[in-house]
Image (cartoon, rainbow, N blue to C red):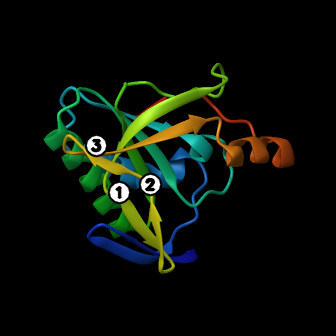
């Protein structure tokens, strides 16, 4: 169990499970599947698909841009994660696009986030700006930490995996 105090919106936790593979998060995925997913999809991405130890579950939501519904899904997933001591790094892909490390080279994706700010061990991290009822940020791929893990550890990143 990792100790790192994270405050994100209404939620705070300081103990987080180490994860390895989708089987390690099956229980949380089952809880997330109970939400109302009409017209929306959920994708697992990142290290959780690479069978290595990781400290978060990277999730991407796709579907229509309806701010109230998008914000509902983002907050519910964050809350479930905090309750289960599994940090869910969940975002909504505004364009509906996903980064697939097996075929994509360079890509920028605009995301909607649960909130624009989080505190990690007391330090504030601003990463999104409010616009039209959503907190938007852009992410450039591949990320530096991804390239480093590939070079240093030989890590192989897999294509996004649809959960819902």
- Characterize the local packing of mark 1: few (<14), some (14-19) or many (20 or more) Cα atoms within 10 angstroms: some
How far separated are the C-alphas under marks 1 and 3? 25 Å
Image disc number at residue 127: 2
Please determine whether, in this image, residue 70 is positioned above or below residue 101. Answer: below
Of the numbered discs 1 and 3, the one sitting upstream in the chain is 3
The residue that mark 1 highlights is: 116
Q: Return the x and y of residue 28 as percentages of the image width and height.
A: 38, 54
Of the numbered discs 2 and 1, the one sitting upstream in the chain is 1
Q: Residue furthest top?
A: 103
How far separated are the C-alphas under marks 2 and 1? 6 Å
In the displayed structure, does residue 7 sit left or right of residue 73?
right
Quarter location, residue 50: top right
Do tag 1 and tag 3 residues touch (Cβ < 8 Å)?
no
Q: Secondary structure at mark 1?
A: loop
Residue occupying the point 62% across, 57% down: 54
Q: Return the x and y of residue 106 as percentages of the image width and height.
A: 64, 26
Do tag 2 and tag 1 residues touch (Cβ < 8 Å)?
yes
The residue that mark 3 highlights is: 33
Image disc number at residue 135: none
């Amino acid at each position: 169990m990792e100790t790192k105090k994270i405050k994100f919106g209404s939620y705070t936790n300081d103990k987080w499970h180490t994860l390895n593979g989708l089987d390690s998060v099956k229980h949380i995925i089952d809880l997330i599947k109970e939400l109302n997913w009409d017209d929306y999809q959920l994708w697992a991405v990142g290290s959780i698909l690479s069978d290595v130890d990781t400290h978060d579950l990277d999730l991407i939501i796709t579907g229509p841009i309806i701010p109230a519904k998008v914000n509902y899904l983002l907050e519910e997933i964050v809350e479930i994660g905090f309750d289960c001591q599994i940090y869910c790094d969940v975002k909504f892909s505004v364009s509906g696009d996903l980064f697939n490390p097996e075929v994509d080279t360079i890509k920028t994706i605009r995301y909607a986030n649960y909130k624009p700010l989080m505190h990690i061990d007391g330090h504030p991290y601003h990463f999104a700006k409010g616009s039209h009822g959503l907190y938007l940020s852009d992410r450039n791929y591949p990320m530096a930490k991804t390239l480093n893990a590939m070079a240093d550890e030989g890590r192989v990143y897999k294509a996004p995996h649809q959960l819902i």
